[in-house]
Structures are given as structure tokens and as C-alpha cells.
Image (spheres, grey):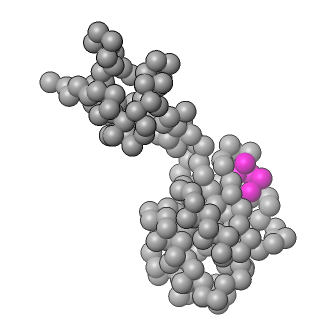
């Protein structure tokens, strides 16, 4: 037997405002049915709907590169493939962006000035656990890379990096959630 939820239950379950749940139900954007004047939802159907919605929003990618670097091509490729790209040109801007948003991938140019690459990447990792972190370098001997790579979930790559390289490492970039839209 399927679990039946109220709009308030769904709002709590999906961590959204109950008014958003009502709006989505009225617009037919969330699977629901009425019992009298009250909206009801099958939990299993909501789970399937949420999983399907996760396949719809553009990927969010943070590109951290020094001012005036050649990574504009990668950013253009990401945008052309419908990704939402945020660019940061120094470590403090990257940390601020990571505090404010959830990203599906982070591409970090090792040439970005920082007092300690490993410490900075560790901060980013703490703010974005589980997010693929791609570290770009001109050569393997660059300062801090040997220290940063063993942190886990950091992939060191040589420049230039293409969209195909990013997709090969983090998967298709058009498969993210669109709940509430």
C-alpha cells in the first residue's frame, strides 16, 4: 500500500514552502490528486517525480581561473552546452561562491594565486562535499599540486581542458534537478 501525504507533508519532505507545493499541484507540475478540496500525494510517486526532475536542470559549474587566463574557451563551451557557469578570479571569490551556491562541478586553475593550494581546496571541499573538483595545471611540478591531489575527489589535469574532458570525468552536464520551477 502506498503512503499518502498531505501538502504540508510533501513540503517538509521536499524542503520547500507549502505554498510552492500548492502552486505546483494547481499547475499540474507535481503529481497530486484531490480528496474533496484537499490535495493528496502518493509518496512513491513523489519520489519518482523528484528523481525525474533531477534530470532536467542545467549543471552548475564553478570555474576558478586567474584574471585574463585562457580558460574562457572552456567557459564558452560550458555555457554553449547550457551549463550555468560562475567564474571566480581568486581564491576568496571562489570560497564566497562555494558558500553561496551548490555546484555540480568545480574547475580550478592551479595558477590562481593562493597562500596554500591544499588549504584552499580543502575549504572548497568542505563547502561542496561530493562535488567533482578538477585541478588544471601547466605541469605536474606546480607548487601545491602534489600536496592537494591526495585530498581525495581532486582530479589533476593538464591544460587545455575541453568540455569533452569535463564530461568524461563528471558525466553529462544536462542531468540536474529542476524541482520547484
Classified by dominant secondary structure, the portion drawn in magenta counts as: helix
Q: Position of residue 147 (x, y in %)?
A: 53, 88
Q: Is residue 29 left or right of residue 92?
A: left
Residue, far left: 1
Q: Residue at x 62, y 63 (%)?
A: 97
Residue 144 position (above or below residue 65): below
- Let me know if residue 17 is in the magenta part: no
39 on left or right of 160: left
- Residue at point 80%, 61% (across, down): 72
Q: Nearer the viewer, residue 35 or 138?
A: 35
Asked if residue 51 shows in the view, the reply is: no
In the image, residue 77 lies at what x, y percent?
A: 74, 51
- Magenta residues, start to end: 75-79
Furthest residue in direction top, as rendered: 36
Q: Nearer the viewer, residue 97 or 110?
A: 97
Relative to 92, residue 12 above or below: above
Evaluate whether residue 89 shows in this view: yes
Amino acid at each position: 500500500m502506498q503512503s499518502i501525504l498531505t501538502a504540508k507533508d510533501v513540503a517538509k519532505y521536499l524542503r520547500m514552502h507549502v505554498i510552492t507545493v500548492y502552486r505546483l499541484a494547481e499547475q499540474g507540475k507535481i503529481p497530486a490528486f484531490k480528496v474533496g478540496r484537499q490535495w493528496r500525494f502518493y509518496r512513491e510517486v513523489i519520489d519518482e517525480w523528484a528523481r525525474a526532475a533531477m534530470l532536467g536542470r542545467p549543471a552548475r559549474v564553478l570555474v576558478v581561473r586567474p584574471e585574463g587566463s585562457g580558460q574562457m574557451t572552456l567557459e564558452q563551451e560550458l555555457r554553449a552546452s547550457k551549463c550555468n557557469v560562475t567564474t571566480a578570479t581568486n581564491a576568496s571569490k571562489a570560497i564566497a561562491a562555494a558558500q553561496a551556491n551548490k555546484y555540480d562541478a568545480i574547475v580550478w586553475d592551479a595558477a590562481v594565486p593562493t597562500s596554500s593550494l591544499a588549504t584552499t581546496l580543502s575549504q572548497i571541499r568542505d563547502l561542496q562535499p561530493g562535488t567533482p573538483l578538477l585541478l588544471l595545471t601547466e605541469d605536474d611540478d606546480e607548487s601545491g599540486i602534489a600536496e592537494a591531489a591526495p585530498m581525495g575527489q581532486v582530479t589533476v589535469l593538464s591544460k587545455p581542458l575541453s568540455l569533452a574532458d569535463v564530461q568524461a570525468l563528471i558525466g553529462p552536464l544536462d542531468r540536474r534537478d529542476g524541482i520547484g520551477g
